[in-house]
Amino acid sequence: MDFPRGHLSYSQIRTYLICPRKYQYAYIEQVPVPLNDKLLLGTVFHSVLEWYFTARLAGSMPGLDETDACFADSFQRLRGAQAVRWDDSPERVSRRGHAFVQHFFHELAPRFDPLMVEKELTAPLDNQPVELRGVIDLVEKDLSITDFKTATARWSANRVRHAQLQMQIYNYLFEKNFGNANSQQRFCVVYSRRGQSVHSQLLEVAAGSDDREHLFQVIGYVADGIQAERFPRNEGFRCGFCEYRDVCLGATPCKRRKHEEEVDEIS
Ligand code: SF4
């Protein structure tokens, strides 16, 4: 079969690796599901970062009030535009988001020197009939790449290790588009359980051409599975908070909290 989006991305690859059936629901059948409130918050936070860094690129320096107003507008717009599964009250989610924005503005924003924002890159893949695509949150003037994440808890070393594939993909895309520019990569994780106390981590990730063999093996496995229409269920702890659980396994009570921080992110 053809690739449903005409390209492969980190999100698609990660979804297939977590559970091929989930990939089928999300990308082929496009089963409509509500957005959970953590993904909503992550999406809104990213839209604020895009607005903020785009303004900086245009030569202005937005203040906290403007940045906070951008969050409020975006939050209202997005929550009205689609169904949301609220695990926490909308008011508390909004308060947590405003706290994230304040933390970003005071603690993180001054550290970044933007060159490109939400940069979409594509590159061909050897031996695959499909392109690889990625959207990099931020490229700075020293060509370092930053991907922002929101979370309820600090990322563990294991969590970083699992996310390395994303940076390996970005490193490959960056090199194919701009040459061997020796870019650095890092995750910037902004986290708080309730919004009262917000923290962040800047996590450098070593991802380079040494990892290419592994990267191509993973991509090949996913691409072959999609083309062969191999979409088996991968039942496990992730089913407990899978948005397709009811469609896949029927409506049964589930524990959403355990391991939730592992999927509490937006790319
Ligand atoms: S409920 Fe489990 S098996 Fe079904 S799609 Fe979700 S993760 Fe896969």
Image: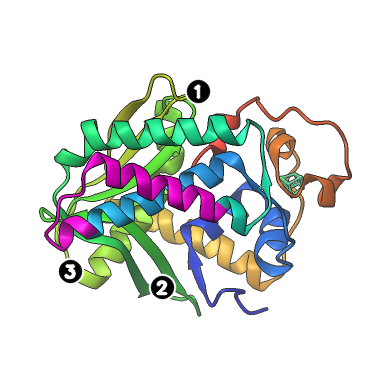
Callout 2, which amino acid?
Answer: Leu
Q: Does residue 262 appear to the left or right of 216 in the view shown? A: right
Report helix, strand or loop for mark 1.
loop
Q: Earlier in the sequence, mark 3 or mark 2?
A: 2
* Magenta residue span: 55-78
- The reply to whether callout 3 and callout 1 are in contact (CB within 8 Å) is no
Q: CA distance from mark 3 to mark 2?
A: 16 Å
Q: Does residue 158 appear to the left or right of 111 in the view shown? A: right
> Which of the 4 quarters of the picture holds residue 154?
top left
The residue under label 1 is: 194
Q: Return the x and y of residue 79 as percentages of the image width and height.
A: 58, 50
Q: Residue at x 19, y 51 (%)?
A: 144
| 18 lies above or below 95 | below
Q: CA distance from mark 1 to mark 2?
A: 42 Å
Q: Nearer the viewer, mark 3 or mark 1?
A: 1
- The reply to whether the magenta stretch includes residue 183 is no
Q: Return the x and y of residue 196 as percentages of the image width and height.
A: 43, 20
In the image, 8 versus 255, the foreground residue is 255
Q: Return the x and y of residue 6 as percentages of the image width and height.
A: 54, 78
Question: Tag on residue 179?
Answer: 3
The residue under label 2 is: 125
Q: Earlier in the sequence, mark 1 or mark 2?
A: 2
Q: Residue at x 68, y 52 (%)?
A: 83
Q: Return the x and y of residue 258 as percentages of the image width and height.
A: 65, 25
